[in-house]
Image: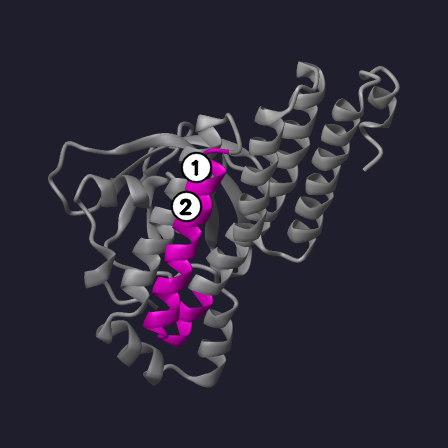
């Protein structure tokens, strides 16, 4: 909190300016303390108090901007941490079937993103957070269906433990075709989630960690829409003769088909 110390010696000699500086410093310390306690709503309250105090002050513009920059930095940092916490908890409640708590976490995540929209001048970042929230809603909707619950209850303990490590539910219907640029024929999917796909077979042209431009369609569907974009080759599973793909952003192939009303995960059974 010594960031303003060099500026104080340049300030006005008036007692009024000195008091304004000290008042802003005190509020900024309070904001930092509130953020450290993990209270994202409290930081917004203190940040508004800081902004009001700065607007009423006669401090030089460069000092005002520095106070605002630091205040937003603390507030944004705790909001980003809390947003990830709400995402993680929502997925956990999805797996346990706790609908009430799941919806509460979704609501808090939405509020967090709305607050962050006023803290950062980055439309691409906010858009990505909204896309992740939509992924969360879609996963939650499918994961708490009666069909999904029945299926989970019938699984063996070993299968349940393996599924518990997954952040996103996986499905084997419908099947997708994935066309890679250096392969003559497309590869079919064995299963998929909102963040990745598992292909049957190992394309000879791909390597682990590489990014590949693909065209993906839904098998057995006569539709004109298809996904075209870049994915990552996550792993080559030699023992399973399969290839794991991951999507670079939340707006991946599965969300593309959901948004275009070609796929409804709430009607699908997770595996």
Tell me which residue sits at (39%, 33%) in the image: 180
Chain part drawn in magenta: 91-118
- Work out whether 264 lies above or below 153: above
Tell me which residue sits at (65%, 50%) in the image: 35
Q: Is residue 100 left or right of residue 119?
A: left
Residue that badge 1 annotates: 128
Indicate the quadrant where residue 179 lies.
Answer: top left
| Residue 229 image offset from top left, x and y in percent | 38, 30
- Work out whether 125 lies above or below 250: above
Residue that badge 2 annotates: 132
Tell me which residue sits at (19%, 33%) in the image: 225
Category of crowding for the residue at label 2, using alpha-carbon neighbours closer than 10 angstroms: few (below 14), some (14–19), many (at least 20): some
Category of crowding for the residue at label 1, using alpha-carbon neighbours closer than 10 angstroms: few (below 14), some (14–19), many (at least 20): some
| Residue 1 image offset from top left, x and y in percent | 81, 38
Q: Is residue 55 visible?
A: yes
| Residue 217 image offset from top left, x and y in percent | 25, 39
Query: Magenta stretch: residue 206 in it?
Result: no
Helix, strand or loop status at disc 1: helix
Prevailing secondary structure class for the magenta stretch in the rendered image:
helix
Q: Is residue 208 visible?
A: no
């Amino acid at each position: 909190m010594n960031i303003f110390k060099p500026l104080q010696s340049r300030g006005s000699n008036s007692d009024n300016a000195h008091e304004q500086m000290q008042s802003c410093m005190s509020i900024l310390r309070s904001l930092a303390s509130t953020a450290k306690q993990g209270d994202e709503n409290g930081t917004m309250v203190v940040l508004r108090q800081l902004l009001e105090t700065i607007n009423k002050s006669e401090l030089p513009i460069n000092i005002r901007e520095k106070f605002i920059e630091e205040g937003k930095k603390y507030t944004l940092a705790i909001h980003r941490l809390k947003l990830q916490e709400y995402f993680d908890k929502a997925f956990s409640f999805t797996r346990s079937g706790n609908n009430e708590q799941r919806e509460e976490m979704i609501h808090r995540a939405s509020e967090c993103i709305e607050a962050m929209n006023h803290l950062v001048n980055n439309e691409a970042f906010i858009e990505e957070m909204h896309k992740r929230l939509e992924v969360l809603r879609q996963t939650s909707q499918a994961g708490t269906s009666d069909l999904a619950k029945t299926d989970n209850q019938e699984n063996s303990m070993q299968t349940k433990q393996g599924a518990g490590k997954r952040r996103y539910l996986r499905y084997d219907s419908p099947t997708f075709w994935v066309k890679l640029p250096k392969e003559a024929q497309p590869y079919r999917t064995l299963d998929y989630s909102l963040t990745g796909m598992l292909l049957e077979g190992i394309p000879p042209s791909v390597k682990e960690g590489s990014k590949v431009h693909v065209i993906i369609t839904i098998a057995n569907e006569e539709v004109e829409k298809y996904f075209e974009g870049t994915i990552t080759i996550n792993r080559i599973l030699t023992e399973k003769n399969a290839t794991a793909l991951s999507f670079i952003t939340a707006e991946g192939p599965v969300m593309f088909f959901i948004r275009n009303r070609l796929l409804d995960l709430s009607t699908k059974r997770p595996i």
